Amino acid sequence: MAIPVDPTEEPRIYQQTLLQEGLRDLLENGKLVDCVLKVKGRELPCHGLVLAACSPYFRARLLAEAGPGQGPRRELVLDDEELEPDLVEALLRYLYSSELPLSDANVKEVLAAASLLQIPSVFTVCVSFLHQRLGLSNCLAVFRLGLMLDCPRLAVAARDLACEHFPLVSKDPDFLGLSAAELTAIISSDSLNVEREELVFEAVMAWASSQAAPAQALAQLLGCVRFLLMPRDYLERQVRAYPLLSSSPELLQKIQQVRDAHRREEGGEQEKEAKKTPAKEEQAPSPGNQEAKEEQPPSLLNKTPRFGMFVKDLIFMINDEATVAYDPTTNECYFASVSSKVPKNHSSVVTKQNQVFVAGGLYYDDSSKENPLHSYFLQFDPLDSDWLGMPALPSPRCLFGLGEADNAVYVIGGKEVNEEEKTLDTVMCYDRHTFKWGESDPLPYEVYGHSVVSHNERVYVIGGKGKDKKCLNRVLVYNPQRFEWRELAPMKIARSLFGAAVYRDKIWVATGVTDSGLTGSIEVYDIAANEWEEMAEFPQERSSLSLVTLSKCLYAIGGFTMVQTESGDFVPTEINDIWKYNDDKKEWFGILREIPYASTATFLPVRLNILRMSKL
């Protein structure tokens, strides 16, 4: 569809097009040519007026050489500059046609030539080209190029990308080729996406180890490392042990200043505790201490957390309206994303790499004639806080389980979404590297309403209902390396629609539906011993309870229970509360009676940066 043109702009665009086509026709036919560019013996005829209009460099030379004695064609020799004839010819043709054949191979040369010859339009086109192709593989090279050409737009964009992915970028061989000033520009940034300052220090030391004379540059770089954000034990045992530091009195002195600052902070904490007792006469700081404090370099005392240090363990609540992250330690919620793309009936899974996937729902694909029905498959993008559409699940189903192992996501069992509602034993496998779906090894039996957990590259399928609609106590484990399912010890109680999670290397299952009704029973499976053990019951009988392991704690969230109405009937009612398990007392205690945004949601343990989200 053509973009509509503003009627007031149409005459100007028409005139520009007419002028450009006319100039190109004059050049191609050698008419009114009054200037020749000479590049390493090669002559390129052109029009001086065009050069002067497009480049301050050419305008200055043409005006300087204008005057009596000039022939019909003025010659501009460019042999003194490091320019190739083909490159200059390409730039010249761009001035007449606005066409410039850019590629990853030549863009840097074109950009350098445009900067040298002062052609702003070419410079802008090259910067936009590099900006669009900016990635982890070239961000350091583009950053250096932006600094060299004094292009802030390019340098800042490349530096921001390097800061965002610093743990990966610091392993790139180009990282060791940065100058001290270039590296300083990166590691001095507050936006560095690192969870621990130790990563910054280790990257600096790796860079210094590759340099010929690193002592002076290292002193400058260490001023950008925020040592006070490191644990004191790491500072004492690891930092001082580096040979480059231990052999330099100047660097050791800097480290000693940081150690002293640590001690003063600890002393300050003790002083605060002392002030809680009856007040004593305050003593003024001694001149010696005051002088030492003033001598501390401000850079070494920088305690401002990096951007990546705001990453926290959160409970991700996903429903069809919004995606919200809940911090149980502070009882705060953060808005992550609108969930208009997420289907109401879905399952979710989080991988070891903290990738969040959602599958479920149903939609009709006109382009697929053989199998037009598909289920949604989405991935959460934590950088943009949005759900991305991934290749659709080709076998739509409901009441299935999701698991992950070996860079793959498994959709296991469930029921067909059609009139037959056939119970399935099939397993679909999504390869996270190739972004493709395929069929995996089927289950030994049909099942739906079961739970799936993943642990140590294994996928466990627990309980559920068979095709006869009877609850199962069977347990299976899948080994992706051997492509086989293996039967494990069965649960003591057959159940479906229950909560399951791995906690302290054991599989916990809680509540659910049995053939006789709801249950509040809890069982724990010892993976090493292949045995089940009964635990204290959950305080209330429920179905569809969610178990989440977060920061070495076990939480139980939501579910459905039977509530008596005023008429005396019992109806299933959704509960949106949160419970936490106490290991010492072996019991559950409630921490929140009702959490907003939890209705109809699935729950996952994730690590996200709270600065990317809005506090609710």
Image (tube, rainbow, N blue to C red):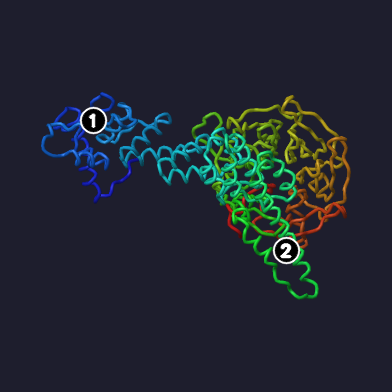
Q: Tell me if residue 406 can be seen.
A: yes
Instruction: Determine whether 558 is above or below 489 in the image.
Output: below
Q: Residue 603 location, x and y as percent?
A: 69, 49
Q: Where is residue 580 in the image (x, y as percent from the top left)?
A: 78, 54
**Residue sitting at x 21%, y 46%:** 11
| Relative to 492, 310 lies left or right | left
**Number of other residues with Cα within 10 Å of mark 2, as a class: few under 14, some 14 to 19, many 20 or more:** few
Indicate whether 528 appears above or below 521: above
The quadrant in which residue 130 appears is top left
Q: Residue furthest left?
A: 68
- Up/down of 86 relative to 329, above or below: above
Q: Quadrant of the N terminus?
A: top left
Q: Which amino acid does label 1 sit on?
A: Leu
What is the quadrant of the C terminus in the image? bottom right
Frontmost residue, 548 versus 165? 165
Q: In this view, does 575 lie to the left or right of 432?
A: right
Say which mark, if any, is on residue 268.
Answer: 2
Identify the residue at horizontal 63%, vertical 32% (top origin). Answer: 430
Residue 436, position in %: x, y? 58, 30
Residue 59 sits in quarter: top left
Badge 1 or badge 2: first in the primary sequence: 1
- In the image, residue 590 lies at what x, y percent? 78, 59
In this rendered view, identify the residue nearer to me: 1 or 274: 274
Q: How crowded is mark 1: few (under 14 residues within 10 Å), some or many (20 or more)?
A: many
Label 1, on which residue? 37
Secondary structure beneath disc 2? helix
- The image's mark for residue 13 is none
Q: Determine whether, in the image, residue 67 is placed left or right of residue 140.
A: left
Determine whether the residue tagged by mark 1 lies in a helix, strand or loop: strand
